[in-house]
Amino acid sequence: MADILTNLVFGDITLITGMIWFLIAIVISMIGGAISGMVIGGKEIGYQFSAMLGSLFAPAGVIPAMILGLLILNFFQS
């Protein structure tokens, strides 16, 4: 556990730290998607439904970008 935390702090990208950053990015994108869904379509279709749709569709753009970003960082690091 200490090695994982050390790798996260110093920016070393391993398989485990890559998965942790990937999960963090997905959670943050879901929160942002829910908030933006509520702002954009809350009055028309309901706040709960628009938050659910926003949180489901937001990771669709983040997942490929996060994978590409981690691959580029890994390439430049080595």
Image: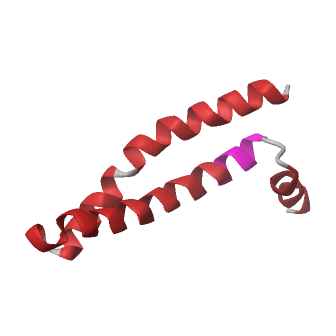
Q: Answer with the quarter of the image where residue 33 lies.
A: bottom left
Q: Which residue is drawn at 38% across and 43% down?
A: 60
Outermost residue on the left side: it is 44
Q: Residue at x 79, y 26 (%)?
A: 76
Side of 69 where 63 appears, left or right: left
Q: Answer with the quarter of the image where residue 4 lies.
A: bottom right
The image shows a total of numbered marks equal to 0
Give x and y (percent) for residue 19: 65, 48
Q: Residue at x 58, y 31 (%)?
A: 68
The C terminus lies in which quarter of the figure?
top right
Side of 18 where 30 appears, left or right: left
Q: Residue at x 32, y 56 (%)?
A: 56
Side of 71 where 62 appears, left or right: left
Outermost residue on the front side: it is 39
Side of 68 where 74 appears, left or right: right
Give x and y (percent) for residue 35: 35, 68
The N terminus lies in which quarter of the figure?
bottom right
* Above-or-below relation of 55 to 15: below
* Above-or-below relation of 63 to 52: above
Main SS, magenta region, reads helix
Give x and y (percent) for residue 14: 78, 41
State which region is magenta: 14-20
Task: In this rendered view, identify the residue nearer to me: 5 or 58.
Answer: 58
Q: Answer with the quarter of the image where residue 36 lies.
A: bottom left
Question: Is residue 69 one of those drawn in magenta?
Answer: no
The image's colour scheme reads secondary structure
